[in-house]
Amino acid sequence: MKSWLKYGFLSAGSYVFVIAILIAIFHCINSASGSQTINNDNRLFYALVAAAGLVMAFLAGFCFRPILARMTSRYSLEYPDIPVEDIRYLCREKLLVQYFGILTCGCFLPAIAMVGVLDSYPEMVCTLSGGGFSFAYLYFQCRNRYKHLCREYRKHYDFETV
């Protein structure tokens, strides 16, 4: 449980760090351009979205270890020929592919939905679009590593794709 909390707080802390950097970047852009696009009505919306993101980041980090342990134990029983360390690494890559896929969709879908109100929430649309592209890049990177691991394990073990 202690490691679960550690990963949850690490994930939430990373989220807070990224949000602080984004706020600083948008503040510099708004100061340089001479416009202040965030009024008092929008600040509440941004604060609620940031708080929801913080809760989701904590939950994703908190749940990562137990999900990984459950996947590892299930696949180690199914494939006893493969060493546990290899199965753990394979399951970790598979879980990361799933996480990054969910995060990519979770960023792109609201960004596409908010394009109609781009004038009201430009920072939100830019942040979600940037996050979507970043998570898509990480998704494809992890997916390629996962496919490579599956090919390698198929060569060495009697292994079907998990």
Image: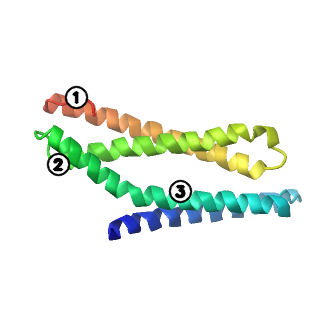
Secondary structure beneath dot 2 equals helix
User: Image check: 140 left or right of 147?
Assistant: right
At label 2, the amino acid type is Val
Q: Which mark is residue 56?
A: 3
Choose the circle earlier in sequence order: 3 or 2.
Answer: 3
What kind of residue is marked 1?
Answer: Glu
User: For the view shown, which residue lies furthest in the bottom direction?
Assistant: 2
Q: Which mark is residue 84?
A: 2
- Residue 106 location in percent, x, y? 58, 43
* Residue 127, horizontal then vertical, whole percent: 67, 50
The disc, 1 or 3, on the residue closer to the chain's N-terminal end is 3
Please give the residue where the numbered disc 1 appears in the rendered image. 160
Earlier sequence position, callout 1 versus callout 2: 2
Image position, residue 111 (x, y; %): 68, 41
Q: Residue at x 67, y 57 (%)?
A: 49
- Tell me the crowding category of disc 2: few under 14, some 14 to 19, or many 20 or more residues within 10 angstroms, Cα based: some
Task: Look at the image and tell me in which quarter the C terminus lies.
Answer: top left
Q: Amino acid at mark 3?
A: Met
Looking at the rendering, which quadrant does residue 90 occupy? top left
Q: Residue at x 51, y 58 (%)?
A: 57
The Cα–Cα distance between marks 1 and 2, rounded to whole angstroms, is 16 Å
